[in-house]
Image (cartoon, rainbow, N blue to C red):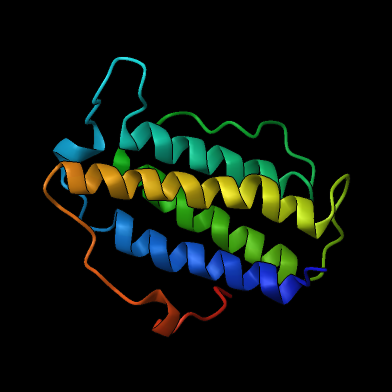
Amino acid sequence: MINRDALRHFLATLAYRGTNVLQDLPVEIATFRPAETVRTPVEILNHINGVLTYAVSFFTPLTSTRPEPAEWNIEVERFFQVLTRLDQLLAEDVPLKEVSEEQLLQGPLADAMLHLGQIGIFRRMGGSPVAAENYVQAEIHFIT
């Protein structure tokens, strides 16, 4: 089964890849909508933040897991803030309510990684691809 250190490493990986995908994203890409029914990168990032906030709600009660839509830079800040909060909850061994560690991984955490990849695709489509990197060799450490 999955231990908390594995989940913390997944969060750190999400933060590492998030840094690569989200930093220096051209403004025109953040609001690019390739089709009427497709989310823009800023809308995708807001969704990621909502999904990660939903993950926080399995540790501590929240009144809402849907952050208000905001501009790109604010959404980027939220992304790293909620990842840090999740890492702290795992590091402090706060008990999960209603779900297991495996369900946390297969649900909101996997969903966040998937959607981060979508933003990477938008970057490439907009002519600003993420630099190639061998992530197996990346130095990734816990967030907190």
Q: Nearer the viewer, residue 97 or 113?
A: 113
Residue at image position (21%, 66%) is 131
Percent coordinates x, y for residue 111 in the rendering:
57, 45
Residue at image position (49%, 47%) is 114
Please indicate whether residue 72 sits to the left or right of residue 49 in the image.
left
Please indicate whether residue 76 sits to the left or right of residue 59 in the image.
left
Percent coordinates x, y for residue 71 in the rendering:
31, 36
Seen as rendered, the residue at the extreme left is 127
Q: Nearer the viewer, residue 74 or 40?
A: 40
Percent coordinates x, y for residue 90 in the rendering:
73, 67
Please indicate whether residue 26 sits to the left or right of residue 108 in the image.
left
Task: State the image quarter where residue 2 is shown.
Answer: bottom right
Please indicate whether residue 65 sits to the left or right of residue 17 in the image.
right
Q: Nearer the viewer, residue 47 or 35?
A: 35
The quadrant the N terminus occupies is: bottom right
Task: Count all numbered tags in the image, as a single digit.
Answer: 0
Task: State the image quarter where residue 96 is shown.
Answer: bottom right
Figure check: 6 above or below 115: below
Seen as rendered, the residue at the extreme top is 36
Figure check: 92 above or below 84: below
